[in-house]
Image (cartoon, rainbow, N blue to C red):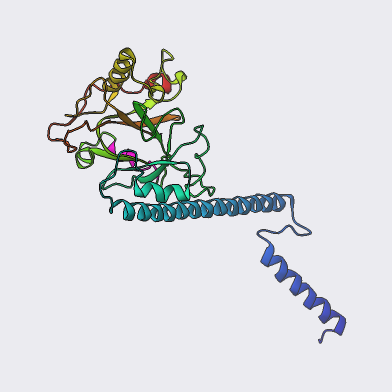
Amino acid sequence: MAMSKSARKAYKKAVRDKKKKKRGHWLLLQKGDSFKEICSKLFTQLCVVVLICCGVILADEFRQSFSSIKLNDSIKNIYQSVQSAITNLTEGEMLPGAEQLLAINPDTVGYVCIEGTEVDFPVVQTDNNDDYLKIAFDGSSNKAGTVFLDFRDTLTSKKRSDNLVLYGHNQRDRTMFGSLKDYKKNLEHYKAHPTITFNSNYHSDVYKIFAYFVTEAEPSQTSDGIIFDYHNYIDLSDRAVYDRFISNIYERTQIVTSVDVEYGDEFLTLSTCSNEFEPSRFVIFARKTRKGEDSTVDTSGAYLNPNAREPDWNAIF
């Protein structure tokens, strides 16, 4: 029997409503939903929101990483192209590469490079150790930050501190100091990369790596509440302070090298966060090549230190 016009209209509306409900039944709240369906949909909606937020955060992470890598490559090309053309400079004359970097960022104090690794970055310094934690070299906001020199250090054409301490983030994309972890208990990596080149705005110097290790960052991470505050050893003119600095390093170093150190030497310290526990630091120590000394390092006798003092695992965990 044929349906009336009103019946057909009602039937079509019912079909449309059914399809509409079917399309959105898994996500959208609808009239007639049971309590169980409401709870399920609210949970699903929450999951969708979380997923979208995670996607946004991940996209921003990739954006910042790409931006950081692109900027670093650009700065590296600018600096190296100019530095390669260096001729004899008079004492106190600024390096050509420094002039280029200072034009981009007046906080520039140098450039650090470990040949054959990803460490190849400009170094800045301000009156604190916070400004460049999340600021890129060009002034843009970026969680990778910029490698910076401890604000207490002095580094001019005529004077420099006994120990220059550089800080850089341990980036997962291996920018900044993210690749320093390759040294950890890795004899072959050390042998392939035993030196660090650090150029101030006025001098180009090679430093020989003689020690590195993971260490605690907070007194609560040690049984006696005492940590090795390596970053506070800036002035080593006092012999007792120097001896304490070196003895703490030798006690902890993961590697034993042929590089000797003596009172009056100048040092470079690279510091970054580590992943063994939170918070922890991985630190590399290098000694400046002395006047008239060859900058090459005999690594044939280097070995991993079996007696290295480890972090205080009992206190940490």
215 relative to 72, above or below: above
In the image, is residue 180 part of the stretch drawn in magenta?
yes
At a point 59% along the width and 51% down the height, the residue shown is 53
In the image, which residues are magenta? 176-183
In the image, is residue 160 part of the stretch drawn in magenta?
no
The outermost residue toward the bottom is 2
77 relative to 221, above or below: below
In front: 317, or 149? 149
Quadrant of the frame with the N terminus: bottom right
Quadrant of the frame with the C terminus: top left
Location of residue 90 by image quarter: top left
Locate residue 197, reporting x and y percent.
Answer: 28, 41
At a point 33% along the width and 18% down the height, the residue shown is 237
Residue 132 left/right relative to 21: left
7 relative to 42, above or below: below
Residue 9 left/right relative to 216: right
At a point 40% along the width and 48% down the height, the residue shown is 99
Q: Can residue 274 be seen in this view?
A: no
In front: 286, or 60? 286
The outermost residue toward the front is 90
